[in-house]
Structures are given as structure tokens and as C-alpha cells.
Image (cartoon, rainbow, N blue to C red):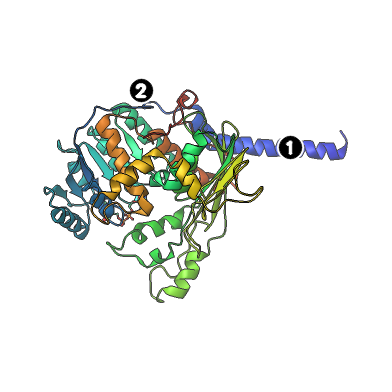
Amino acid sequence: MPQSTRRDFLKTVTTASAAALALSATGCATDSVPPRTKGKSVVGLRAPKLDTVRFGIIGLGERGGPTLRQMLVLEGVRVTALCDNYRPALYAGLAVVEKAGAPRPADFGNGDEDFRRLVARDDVDAVMICTPWRWHVPMAVAAMRAGKHAFIEVPAAVTLEDCWQLVEVAEETQRHCMMMENCCYGRDELMLLRMCREGLFGELLHGEGAYLHDLRAQMKGISAGQGEGLWRIPEHLGRDGNLYPTHGLGPVAQYLSINRGDRFDRLVSFSSPAAGLVDYAAKNLPADHPRRGMKFACGDLNTSIVKTARGRTILVQHDTSNATPYSRLNTIRGTRGNFVGYPSRIYLEGRSAKPDQWDTDLASYYAEFDHPLWKKVADAAAKLPPGSAGGHGGMDFVMRWRIVQCLREGLPLDQDVYDAAAWSAVGPLSEQSVAQGGAPIVVPDFTRGAWETTAPLGVVS
Ligand SMILES: NC(=O)c1ccc[n+]([C@@H]2O[C@H](COP(=O)([O-])OP(=O)(O)OC[C@H]3O[C@@H](n4cnc5c(N)ncnc54)[C@H](O)[C@@H]3O)[C@@H](O)[C@H]2O)c1
């Protein structure tokens, strides 16, 4: 063999073996040997209709507080139980209910495990879990095992094992388990879902999602009651990857019919150096602050690329540690056009005002393609007391309205436990790839093959 050919051959073999090793050492084992399951698939699960949905809410902090306020104005809902292990948050929640003139819920605030008494109650049909990430899975599992539907904040889980646990317990109990990815219910996201379904972008090839949000001020929060800073910053100490993938990824996964005709197949991931939090601490925290001088494992800007089974690509980024305007990227690219978010712009072949140039005034697109759910719920929201339907531009209210509609009418939810698992798994899988120098990691098929026969999410109304 000539020397150059031999060198190329050896290089190919070495690269291929390294990739194979990386795959077998990580995702392959999980992927090829699905965990045992006791139940049947919950794809398309319909639960018995509930005339009035009785909710328990666990976690009444920055997210749980507004969640409670909105649940109190929704038709066909009662909030029957509240839980927070931080008494001031629990009392604030009870005061909100009293002010709204609703019946007093049962309250649970006796330590970390008191949520177990909430999920056991007969007057709770569904549980909303708005606690720090590490509590999501134990709480959802306890709720489902007690016969309750579980609605979890994002991300649903932070380890692969926990992603599988959610799937297995949902199948075993035949309960809904939804991760409440509110960004799927934004006006642009709903419109894009509709436009993708109607084929306006042609064949879909590539999507991009992100969570670029300057959360450096959370460095100050080190005491109970100071919100996310207390528990979110410590996540940066021991993990290096995409810590919060689902806000950007969820809508793109819906455009691309992930778990419903396509699925995440593998990903690669790289992180930048970790510099932003240290820089912030040096400039903004007093010399004796416990977070001065901390060393963070998590690279500030994580970039992952997911390849799907049908060959499409998704870019997912995360950065909460630096000066940056907010962005979820919200991009979809196809053979006949593109949409790029932040700021929103669109190009559709044959329709855009000028060839090769973005349309930045989207008024005519909203007029023609607004999702029916957005139109209907925005109308419903307009009839509510001032201020009660707000939150992230209205998408929080649309999501909660839709959850209640599905539970009351016995409909399948728009996001199921397989979505919760696949979208959340990008977090721990990105950590695996980063730890192996960006090696490709196989994404488990949480549907165990059902993605091939499940119909894409339709344009519901
Ligand atoms: N979807 C969104 O747009 C969005 C926005 C913000 C936060 N979140 C998510 O919501 C969740 C909560 O975030 P947050 O900002 O409200 O945090 P937070 O710290 O303000 O609130 C969490 C609350 O949970 C309580 N809690 C912690 N452990 C508990 C336990 N064992 N039992 C009962 N209560 C417990 C805390 O006392 C606190 O009141 C996180 O998963 C976060 O990622 C989602």
C-alpha cells in the first residue's frame, strides 16, 4: 500500500474505531437494550374525561406562584392542594387563593418529603410540579404511582436514567406525564407548526433552538426564598453540557415531528470555556461572598448538533452566564423557505416581497397563518380579569388552557412522556459528548419504535 493511502486508511480506521468506542461506551447500550417495562405504550393516551380538574401544585416560587394565579382563573379547574417546603412561599400561595375568593386548599409544608401526602389525596386529579430540577422525577413518579397525572416544569429530568424512569412509570400507571414546555405555545411557534404542517417551507431540513438568557444575577441568590439562584447556579459546578435544552428544542422538535415520524438519532456537543460567572462575581459580589472564587465546570456556551433518523439536523445552544440579549433562535429551514427568530423574519420562495430578502413585517403571515388555538385562546384570555392571562407573551396561558381542555375532554396531550424524555435527554447526552471531546452519542429511542407509526402532531383547535 502506498504510504499516503496507508496513512489515510489508518486514519479512517482509528477515527471509526474511536467513534464506535464512544458510541458503545455511552448511548448504544441504553439504545440497543431498552429497559424492562411493566406497562403498554402511552402514545396517544386518552384518560377518562374530568368535568372539573382538581390540581395540586408543588413548588410555589417564581414559576409556581404565577402558575397558581392562572389556574385559579381557568374554567373547570379547582386548586385543592398546595405544597412548598419553604413556609413563606406556601403562605403566599394560600394568600393568593384567599384573595381570589376560591376555597382554601389543603397545605403541605412539613419538609422535603411532604409532597407525598399531597399526591395521596383523593381530591387531587393532577399535580403540577414547579420545583427545582432534581425534585421533578421523584415528585412525578410519586404522583403517577398515586394515580395522578403529572405535569412537570422544564427540563423534566437531568439524567438518562430518570428520563427512562418517567417513561416506565407512565406506561406502568397509564397516567399522563407531560413536561410543560410552554415555548411550544408561543404565537410564532404555533404559527410555524401550522406552516410546517401545510408544507410552506417545503421539505424540512434543519432547525435551531437555544436558551440564551443572561441569568448572571442569580449568582447573588444563596438563601432560601431567593429563587432559582439558590439551586440553578450549583448545577454549573459539576456538569458541563446543555443544562436547559427544552425551551428552544421543544418547538423545533414539534416542527420536525420528532417521536411522530422522525426521532433524535445521535448528537455531538462542545462547550466554550467557563468565564462569565467568574467575571460577574469579580465585578458584582462582595469579597467575602461564598460564590467569589468558585470554579465552574460548565462551559458558558454549549453548542450541540442533533442528527435525526431521517437525516435532518438540529442545532441547540445554551448560555445563561454572559451578557446577551434573550434568544431561543427558533429557526426552521426547508427547501422552499426559512424562518429565523429573534428578531422574527421569514423568507418564502414566491411569496416574500423581494427575492433573497427577509420579510420582517409578519402582519400578513399572522393574519393568514395564526394557529387556531392561538386565536381561540387569545379571545378567551381577553375576557379574563386584567393581568391574569399574561406570562411570556401569552404562551403560558395558552398552554395551561390547552392542558385543561385535554383533561376535560379526554384528549391526548400535545406533548407526551416520550417528548419529555427525548427533549430532556439532550442535557445529559450533551454532557457525555462534551466529556468525550465531542464524540457522537446515540440518543435512546424512548418510544421503542412507535415513532415510526405515530402520526405527526396536527393543527389542533
Ligand atoms: N417554563 C418556564 O418558562 C419556566 C420559567 C421559570 C422556571 N421554570 C422551571 O420551574 C421550576 C421552578 O423554578 P422557579 O424559578 O420557580 O424556582 P424557585 O426556586 O423560585 O421555586 C421553587 C420552589 O420549590 C420549592 N421546593 C423546593 N424543594 C421542594 C420540596 N422538596 N417540596 C416542596 N417544595 C419544594 C422551593 O421552596 C421554592 O419555593 C424549575 O424547574 C424551572 O426550570 C420554568
Q: Quadrant of the N terminus?
A: top right
- Assess disc 1: are there few (<14), some (14-19) or many (≥20) residues with their C-alpha within 10 Å of its C-alpha: few
Q: Residue at x 68, y 36 (%)?
A: 16
Residue 369 relative to residue 137: left or right? right
Q: Residue at x 84, y 37 (%)?
A: 5
Query: Is residue 428 at all visible to an observer of this figure?
Result: no
Please give the residue where the numbered disc 1 appears in the rendered image: 12
Q: Taking 104 as reference, is 253 above or below it?
A: above
Q: Nearer the viewer, residue 302 or 186?
A: 186
Q: Is the CB of the residue bearing disc 1 within 8 angstroms of ligand 1?
A: no
- Assess disc 2: are there few (<14), some (14-19) or many (≥20) residues with their C-alpha within 10 Å of its C-alpha: few
Q: Nearer the viewer, residue 18 or 255?
A: 255
Query: Is residue 320 at all visible to an observer of this figure?
Result: yes
Please give the residue where the numbered disc 2 appears in the rendered image: 40
Image quarter for residue 374?
A: top left
Image position, residue 181 (x, y; %): 39, 44
Callout 1: SS: helix
Query: What amino acid type is highlighted by mark number 2?
Result: Lys
Query: What amino acid type is highlighted by mark number 1?
Result: Thr
Image position, residue 405 (x, y; %): 28, 36
Lower sequence index among marks 2 and 1: 1
Q: Quadrant of the C terminus?
A: top left
